[in-house]
Image: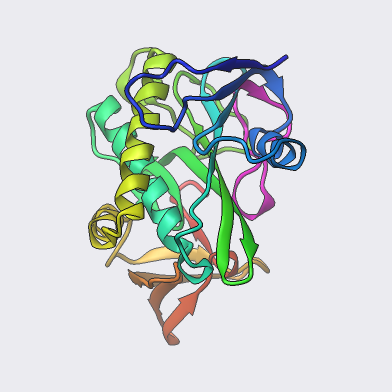
Amino acid sequence: MAIRLTNMENNLFIGKVRYVFDTLPSTNDFLTQLLLTKSKPPEGTIAYADNQTDGRGQYGSRWYSAAGENLLLSILLYPTWLPASEQWLLSEAMVVAVRETVEEVAQCSAHIKWPNDVYLGERKTAGLLIQCGLSGAQIQHAIVGVGLNVNQTQFPPEVPNGTSLALACGRAFDRNAILEHLLRRIEQRYVQLRHGHREPIRRAYRDHLLGLGQQRRFAYPDGRFFEGTPEEVLSDGRLVVQSAQGKVVFATKELIWLMENE
């Protein structure tokens, strides 16, 4: 059963309305259904679950999370002021906020793995799934799903490169405190984008991009492997890689970035 809360004093709007569940198939799906059944829920409404039975990551993959140990949430936004052609900026702003949260809480360097995962060293601690509803050339709404590994210390074989704040720091964390920190950071970066301050967001994304200028291993969706050097991320989110075939530009679904233990 959902519990609705409206008591977040430090934020302007994100997290003022919350739906909290013990278990839910998907927080993204919950907000999608809420949009269909409720007349425009307030911007910043979040859905939070201690456990997800059908959580999803990038490329349709499953998001594995131990019940009651991590943060699993989705945030409803209305970035109608952002053209659909520039929706990558929203992705950049959101993952920058998550990375900042991880680094500030863990007190160690965190990086962004293209397109929108957060890593501590060579291991993944957070991922985002952003789903936008479009009308013509404008964004009507965006649902920002965030999975952040907090206290989980064991991961299934399907997650060979997973880690958590607890594993990285050697101690357990207060999930509620991290949630509030995360929501504040997300609101700050979202408001910054809404006010048109795009360059600081783009710079924060690029400055913390994992493997930029380094030779890395990649795979095509059909399983073929190759090595290349990431050089830059274009304004639409495509990755430029210098490979043996020259410079190649990849959209997010055209390339799988492999880590050392994958």
Q: Is residue 186 left or right of residue 206?
A: right
Q: Is residue 222 visible?
A: yes
Residue pictured at 26% horizontal, 58% vertical: 197
Q: Position of residue 8 (x, y in %)?
A: 41, 19
Q: Is residue 71 above or below residue 116?
A: above
Residue 191 placement, left or right of 217: left
Q: Residue at point 50% right, 74% down?
A: 250
Residue 82: x and y in percent read 45, 62
Look at 62% across and 18% down and name the residue there: 67
Residue 53 covered by magenta stretch: yes
Q: Quadrant of residue 34?
A: top right
* Tally of numbered tags: 0
Residue farthest toward the front in the current orientation of the protein: 39
Vertical relation: 226 (above or below) 194 = below
Report the quarter where the N terminus lies. top right
State whether residue 120 appears in this view: no
Front-most of residues 43 and 255: 43
Magenta includes 120? no
**2 in relation to 139, above or below:** above
Q: Nearer the viewer, residue 13 or 231?
A: 13
Q: Main secondary structure of the magenta part?
A: loop
Residue shown at 31% from the left, 21% from the top: 169
Question: How has the structure been colored for display?
Answer: rainbow
**Residue 209 position within the rendered picture, expressed as x and y whole percent measured from the top left:** 31, 56
Residue 27: image location, x then y, percent? 65, 33
Magenta span of residues: 49-66
Residue 122 placement: quadrant: top left
In the foreground, 101 or 243: 101
